[in-house]
Image (tube, rainbow, N blue to C red):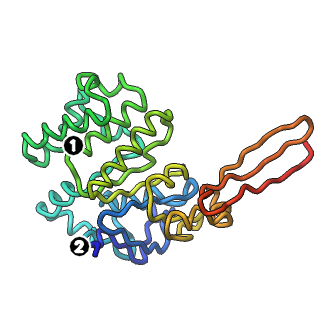
């Protein structure tokens, strides 16, 4: 039976006490599970992940990690703080948040150094991660000399080198070329196969198809609109359309334009729907 890694019960959070970001969220994430959090811009995906990582705390309700409530009191306990940061790794949507040292190698080794991790194990992890991501040639370069894809890989490496049990990634493939996206997806699948818990937020339903087994859909009311197995969520055309998650393709044929939505579960018999109109 899988352990309950995270549990959220009636969680509310607002910024500056005035701007609601999450409104009554219930969720459970189990050990070894692959979870995707999806929703339109402003639905609260990044806030959801930040709560899981203890970067912010709920205004109301409870967020628990392995049964321990995540709040200011918990993180004032140095032993808990160190254990939590050792077990849970977070990759920000903006990699520049994580890259602040003179060189990429120093950035990658910053976390292990601060946590006092075993040097031999860290060196072994560094070698493995750099090979997986193909970033060995970037070690002596500074962050501002890298492309967005290279920065994303370096930020991911700075988390993977600590070998956390839980990986939380905010939009891990956003703005990346297909090859780099493929590389990161394959890496996440490898980490999941090794028993890691993987939680991502994304707009890209193609990534959800590959990476997730469980999906939470956040609505514009900043509540959970639906949750369930990946195939069930991605084959629910009405749910995806209602939450601005349907891909719309447009084709022009002379004076006529044709638009149709694209569904993501052909294996379940989903079909594209179409709309014709005069242009």
The one of 115 and 71 positioned closer to us in this rendering: 115
Q: Residues within 10 Å of mark 2 (few under 14, many from 20)?
A: some
Q: Residues within 10 Å of mark 1 (few under 14, many from 20)?
A: many
The label on residue 161 is 1
The one of 146 and 278 positioned closer to us in this rendering: 278
Numbered-mark total: 2
Image point (37%, 39%), residue name? 95
Q: Which quadrant of the figure contains the N terminus?
A: bottom left
Image point (24%, 57%), residue name? 165
Residue that badge 2 annotates: 68
Whole-percent x, y for residue 143 in the image:
32, 28
Q: Secondary structure at mark 2?
A: strand
Give residue 154's quadrant in the image.
top left
Q: Is residue 190 left or right of residue 218?
A: left
Whole-percent x, y for residue 114 in the image:
14, 45
Image point (36%, 68%), residue name? 29
Q: Is residue 60 left or right of residue 124?
A: right
Residue 240 appearing in the image: yes
Q: CA distance from mark 2 to mark 1?
A: 25 Å
Whole-percent x, y for residue 216 in the image:
49, 65
């Amino acid at each position: 039976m899988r352990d309950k890694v995270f549990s959220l019960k009636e969680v509310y959070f607002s910024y500056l006490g005035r701007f609601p970001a999450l409104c009554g969220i219930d969720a459970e994430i189990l050990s070894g599970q692959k979870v995707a959090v999806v929703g339109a811009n402003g639905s609260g995906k990044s806030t959801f992940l930040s709560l899981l990582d203890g970067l912010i705390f709920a205004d109301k309700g409870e967020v628990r990690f392995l049964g321990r409530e995540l709040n200011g009191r918990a993180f004032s306990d140095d032993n808990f703080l160190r254990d939590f940061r050792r077990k849970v790794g977070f990759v920000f949507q903006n990699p520049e948040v994580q890259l602040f040292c003179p060189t990429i190698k120093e950035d990658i080794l910053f976390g292990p150094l601060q946590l006092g991790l075993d040097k031999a194990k860290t060196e072994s992890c560094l070698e493995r991660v750099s090979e997986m991501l193909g970033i060995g040639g970037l070690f002596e370069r500074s962050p501002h000399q890298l492309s967005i894809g290279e920065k994303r890989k370096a930020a991911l490496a700075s988390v993977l080198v600590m070998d956390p049990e839980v990986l939380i990634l905010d939009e891990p493939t956003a703005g990346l070329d297909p090859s780099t996206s493929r590389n990161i997806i394959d890496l996440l699948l490898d980490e999941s196969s090794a028993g890691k818990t993987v939680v991502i937020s994304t707009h890209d339903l193609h990534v959800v198809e590959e990476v997730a087994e469980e999906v939470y859909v956040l609505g514009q009311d900043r509540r959970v609109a639906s949750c369930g197995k990946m195939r069930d969520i991605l084959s629910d055309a009405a749910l995806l359309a209602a939450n601005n998650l349907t891909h719309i393709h447009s084709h022009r044929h002379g004076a006529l334009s044709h638009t149709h939505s694209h569904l993501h579960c052909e294996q379940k018999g989903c079909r594209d729907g179409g709309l014709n109109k005069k242009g």
